[in-house]
Image (cartoon, coloured by chain):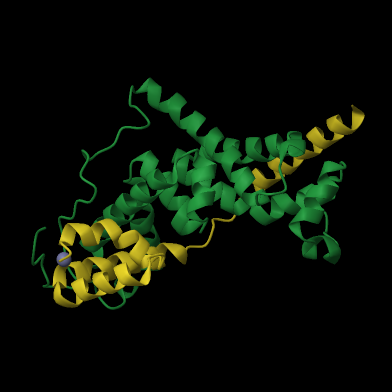
Chain colours: A yellow, B green
Amino acid sequence: MLTCKDFLHELSDYLDQSLDADIRTKLESHISECPNCWVIADTTRKTIQIYKGMDPYPVPADVQSRLMQALERKIAAKQKE
Amino acid sequence: MKNRPMTAPSLAEADEATLVAQSREGDGRAFGELVRRYESKIFRLAQHVTQNREDAEDVLQETFLKAYEHLDQFQGAAKFYTWIVRIAVNQALMKLRRRRTDRSVSLDEAIDTGEDTIVREVAAWDENPEQRFSRAEFGQILDEAIQGLEPPYRSVFVLRDIDELSTEETADALDLSIPAVKSRLLRARLQLREKLTRHFKRKGDDAFAYL
Ligand SMILES: [Zn+2]
């Protein structure tokens, strides 16, 4: 029988769906009988989903213009070589 | 002259390999398009790793300058983004180390001791936890939870779960083994889950078990 510790150890791969069918079946039968692990798996899955949906921060205009100016200088210097 | 020249549609649609090849030949506009595609992701990564706005701005700039300078070292086998992520992570860690040594804290310091997985609080969440908060509050909860992670976990989590790099790409970008990426990711996810549970758990539903 799989322990809760075994389950947690495999949790990441389980949520990423990167496990072989037989170990997956064992994990699924564990959470069907273990409410704790079910909640942990469910809330961890939600945690991952929430962060996946985050948009990148836009680069502020002043930061971007400094970046572009620095690049232009770099490119000009490289072309002179 | 404007800082962001209008990009011709052909540039915006060009595939990455073409843009890299053109940049190598000194085409600044092609390289500008690569910057445009990835700057906000690199900026986010830099902010998460350095946790300092000024450092993140430096990292953003240094990353693209270094990338341009060393473009001939880029092996076409990897994705361009993975390659610049590696540069960005190195720059960010350097900043972090510089700041941290001032306070004599080690970068690789880990908070838990060998135990793979520590779970203290188990409670189901509200169906739609974001509805309980304003957009700004919700965003702040997410940001603070990430900031509470130790740097080794934080960078793995950001690359794997926010930037959605593969385990292999993350290992490559951070110079870690695949098992190290996996174990750090698991800990990061469990720690974040725990931090978020404090905010998102169903009202009146207290921890009902300890493992
Ligand atoms: Zn269990």
Asked whether residue A77 is in view, the answer is yes
Which residue corresponds to the image point at 39% horizontal and 21% vertical from the top-left? B102
In which quarter of the view is residue B161 placed? bottom left
Q: Nearer the viewer, residue A42 or A26?
A: A26
Q: Position of residue B8 (x, y in %)?
A: 86, 62
Quadrant of image for the C terminus of chain A? top right
Number of marks in the rendered image: 0
Which residue of the protein is positioned furthest toward the right in this rendering?
A80
Q: Position of residue B44 (x, y in %)?
A: 52, 50
Which residue corresponds to the image point at 27% horizontal and 67% vertical from the top-left? A41
Q: In the picture shown, does residue A73 fall above or below B162?
A: above
Q: In the picture shown, does residue B202 fall above or below B82?
A: below
In which quarter of the view is residue A37 placed? bottom left
Q: Quadrant of ligand 1?
A: bottom left
Asked whether residue A70 is in view, the answer is no
Which residue corresponds to the image point at 31% horizontal and 46% vertical from the top-left? B148
Quadrant of image for the N terminus of chain A? bottom left
Q: Nearer the viewer, residue B175 or B2?
A: B175
